[in-house]
Amino acid sequence: MQHAKMPAATPKHAPVAALRPALFARYGALEDLRYDYPLVLLEDARGGGVFRPLIRLIDETLSAATAPGPQSEAQRQQVLRLEASIRRRVAAGESGRLSDLWRTSAAALLAAHGEAPFGPMDTNLDRARERLRGDGAVVGCDAATPKAVLTHVWRAVHADKALAFRKKVDGLILRLSDILKADFMKSDEAHGPEALKAAVGNADGAAIDFGALSDILARARPVDRLPEDRVQRIGWALSVLSGQRFYGPVRGSELLPGQPEPHRYVFESCAEALDAYRRRLPEVVEFVRALTTAELEADGKYRPAQHDPVLAAFDESDLTTDQITLLPAALVLLRDGDDDTSETVRAFEALASSLPIKVLIQTDDILGATSPEPSRQAFGGGSARLAAMAMGTNTAFALQASSAHLYRMRDALVRGMRYDGPALFCIYSGATPTVEGVAPYLLAAAATESRAFPTFCYDPSAGPDWARRFDLSTNPALEADWPTYTLDYEDGDGQRHSTQTAFSYIDFAMCDARYARYCQPIAKSDWSDKMLPAADWLKLSPAEAAARVPYVLGIDADNRLGRCGVAEKVAEAATRFLDAWRRLQERAGIRNSHAERLLAAERVKFEARLAEAVAKATAAAPVAAPAPAPAPAPAAAAAAAPPAPAAPVTAAPAAAKPAEAEASAAAPPSDLPWIETARCTTCNECTQINAALFAYNDNMQAYVLNPDGGSFRQLVEAAESCQVSIIHPGKPRNPDEPDLPALIERAAAFA
């Protein structure tokens, strides 16, 4: 799509190196804000999730360690100061467990501030640390985050599977061992003098003649020994189950002498993972054969004539899904730029195999090089479409998200790792090397907002149709092309102004140094009526667009606001990404072209039937009757008419009392979501989650704009992120929304 010629870059408005989207002006040092990062990768995931934001743990600690009221304000301020210190340390690149960072930060605060100004700081911090629920590695939002988080989630799920595996296998080992032990107790060896002496021990051994006792027991010993073939069969099953290499020993224990090292299941390439699976396949078949034998023998149901030929012919083609999923899933860690693009082919080979292989494709660069030649060492712009392509396999779990949304997608991450089949996780880290001066978290969030890297999840196990399997609800302004926000700014005369601006793919591309020459600042003297906001320009027909110049609002290093003209290359890319977003919307049932076409056809049919019915009614109308005789003169009619009775006087209903009306307006039905608008602090948390669900009134205080404008999950997440806890999610309005039991439980705290 072409547009009118953009004013050329001249010395008075040359490209600015630090050009950023105008909406970035409201975000400064993220380490001073309380948001989803740093994340704590919990070592014990049984209580409160696999990973959680530091601020959530701190808030829970304060609730448990401090009493409400001003008497505990000193301790609250000290703990919050400690949290800020940990955030700054992590932002500076420091790593470690939360407990270690707590101690280090507490010592630094004491050394810097002493006991002032809040009293016994060391005592207060120690008391708070005792109430800290959970510990683990603390990670910030950087290039290492996707790998760290996905590996941690895989290990947590792997530990759960190992627990179930050991419970099943160890139970069978114990039962089979008891069978062999009971049979051994009937043998000559078990009743020999030496065996009897060892069983009794040295304390009472001197008073017993074990030879005579052995003779007595030999005469009374039963002779119903197990058949030799069964003893050998049970012994073989025990040796295979005991020597399995799929899971290692329980946490905190070590390998026994002679016990083989467990198999490794974390790989750096799909080829390595597939080769390992093929290499271990005979071992898997033998283990499943031994497991089946053990289950039948333990229950006394093994029939050699029936089961021997079946188990002898058992091979990899007979493996069931339950048998395969009992074993560990493989995790493949790929990174855009580090792996050859041929790994993409191998990744889709793994996804199409129906094997439990989980593939992480981390990308640090969505835009890719400006050259049209495809890179051999990077997925580039294609990385934003890999997850959508994976949905075409129908049986693979697919999730796409940026690092900024990992916590919001935590439940989906766990579901994907627990899914019986293959899974693909495409994660954008936000750590693009060609973007300077923008925090990875902010850039990752911008990728989602701009539709460059939308968040979505495809779960084949969620149900039989797309409505249950595909979830796009975590994106902002779900039904719009681009999210729109209010931008407040001050002009050269010190006057405040507000304008509505969309955040599009072009705003995201503006941050990248490679694309700086495609977004040129335009001097105010060159502004004209031909200029149009890029989001509006993208809606024009090709003929209309050719006569206009698209622009976006940008700021320079000094936060000076201006218009930036957009070159055709970036405008065309925005069109492609917008088209991809609309295809995702259709899959989610939004603006579905098939439904719209069917609705239009039905509307035409309805209007035709209506016109036909009107025509028939007109044709069947009776012929008009003759006109009646003229009415008598008004004066004569009045004289002949009897006097009319007086109309009864009815008192007007009393107006509702103001207090009652106000109380009625402030008490919505318990099922509806609502906000305590008068207490809103205008923090933008809820409106950024979904501007179609939440909005600001004239006083810039939030209210629920449309209860059906978003999902129940977004209502719950908004309530959890609200710093003053004024959002009440109400009850779910869509009974088919995924994970409702867990969401209702989370929403109960804000009822």
Image (cartoon, rainbow, N blue to C red):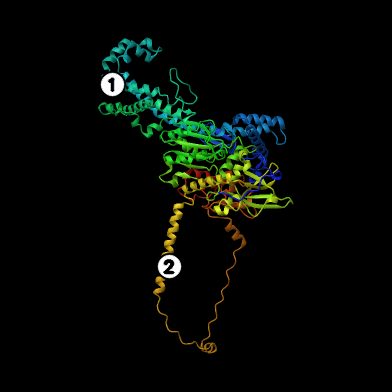
Instruction: Give the answer, above or below, for where 242 lies relative to 14.
Output: above
| Residue 179 visible from this viewpoint | yes
Residue 398 x/y as whole percent: 47, 39
Per the rendering, the mark at residue 229 is 1
Which comes sooner in the sequence, label 1 or label 2?
A: 1
Circle 2 residues within 10 Å: few <14, some 14–19, many ≥20: few
Instruction: Give the answer, above or below, for where 199 lies relative to 540.
Output: above
Amino acid type at circle 2 is: Ala
Residue 585 x/y as whole percent: 49, 48
User: What residue is pinned by disc 2?
Assistant: 611
User: Which residue occupies the foreground of this view, 741 or 340?
Assistant: 340
Residue 542 x/y as whole percent: 55, 52
- How many numbered dots are placed on residues in this image? 2
- The alpha-carbon separation of the residues under discs 1 and 2 comes to 88 Å
Circle 1 residues within 10 Å: few <14, some 14–19, many ≥20: few
Asked which quadrant contains residue 247, the reply is top left
| Residue 747 visible from this viewpoint | no
Amino acid type at circle 1 is: Asp
